[in-house]
Image: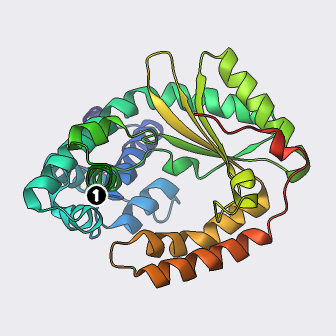
Amino acid sequence: MNREIELLKKENTPENVIEHSKAVCAEAMKIASNFDNVDCDLIQKMLSFKHEERPTTDEIIQVCETLLARKKTGYQGDLAKVKERGNVNDTEAKECAKIAESVYDKAALKEPTITNDVIQSAEGAGAKMYGLDFRMKQPTSMAGKIASDSKDDGVSFDQAGAGIKDAIRYTAVIPEDKFTDGYNQIKSSMEKKGYTEVRCKNFYDLYAKGESAQKAVQSVYKDKDGQYFEFQFHTPNSQGAKELNHPLYEEQRAKTTSVARAKELNDIMTRIGKNVSDPKGVMSIKSHK
C-alpha cells in the first residue's frame, strides 16, 4: 500500500486521484478487517466515491498511513482474539501473529494471478463468484488458527503455519441444475491453467453419512509454485444455509462452548442442511486427499 499512497500524494488530476484512491482503499480494507476499532465506515465511503460524500485526499492518506503503522506491529493490538481462540499467552500469540503475517504476505503476491484464473474458470462454467472481496484470509484470523491447530495437533507454530491451505479462498455459486457439470468444468479449466486439485471433500456425501452438518463441495488447489488456496462450490440454497449456519458454527467451535451446547448447535445446523436439496449427480464427485 505504500506505493499507492505515494502515487496518490503526487497526483493532481481528479481522474488519477480517484483511481489511486480506490487502490489505496482496497488495500486498507484488507488491513482494517484485523482491528476492532478502525473507522471502516470512512474507508467504505472512500470506496463508494459518491461525489457529495467523497473524502479528501488528505483524509484518505491519514487513515491509510495509520493502518500501515498498526500493521507494522504485527497486529499486536488485537492479540486478544488470537489468545482466546488458541488458548495461548502473550508471547505465543505474538509469535503466531508474526508467522501469520508472513503467510499472508507470501499469498498476497500470488493472489492476483490466481484470482484472475479462478474468475475465468468460474465464469466459463456459468458460475458466479461469491464474497470475492474477502478472498484473503486476514492475519489475525490465521494467527488464531495457527495457535489453535498447534495445540490441537501437537505441532509447532511454524508447522501449523505451513499447514494453512486457505490463506486465499474462493466460493463459486453454481445453479443447482448445473452444479455437477459446473464443478467438473471448473476443475478441468483450472487443470489446463496449471493448477492441481490436491484435496476434495464432498460434504453432500458426508452429510448423507451423518458426518457433516453442511452441504457443499470444498477443494484445495495449488499452483505450480506450491501456493495453496481453497475453492468452495455451492448452490444458491447451500450458500444460503452456510450463511445461516455461520454464527452457529462460530459458537460451536469456541473453546468455552460446552459439549452439550455444541451437540445442540450441530443438530440445528443439520436441520438447516436438510432443506438443501442434492444436485443431480453430485455423489459422482469423489472426495480425495
Instruction: Return the residue at label 1.
Output: 59
SS category of the residue bearing label 1:
helix
Q: Nearer the viewer, residue 222 or 287?
A: 287
Q: Residue furthest front?
A: 209
Q: Residue furthest left?
A: 91
Is 57 situated above or below 105?
below
Relative to residue 115, is residue 188 drawn left or right?
A: right
Q: Nearer the viewer, residue 288 or 3?
A: 288
Relative to residue 32, is residue 212 drawn left or right?
A: right
- Residue 223 location in percent, x, y? 51, 21
Residue ID at (48%, 39%)? 15
The mark total stands at: 1
Is 179 situated above or below 258?
above
Residue ID at (64%, 17%)? 193
Residue ID at (81%, 37%)? 182
Relative to residue 1, is residue 79 drawn left or right?
A: left
Residue ID at (77%, 42%)? 127
Q: How is the image coloured?
A: rainbow
Q: Quadrant of the C terminus?
A: top right
Q: Quadrant of the N terminus?
A: top left
Callout 1, which amino acid? Glu
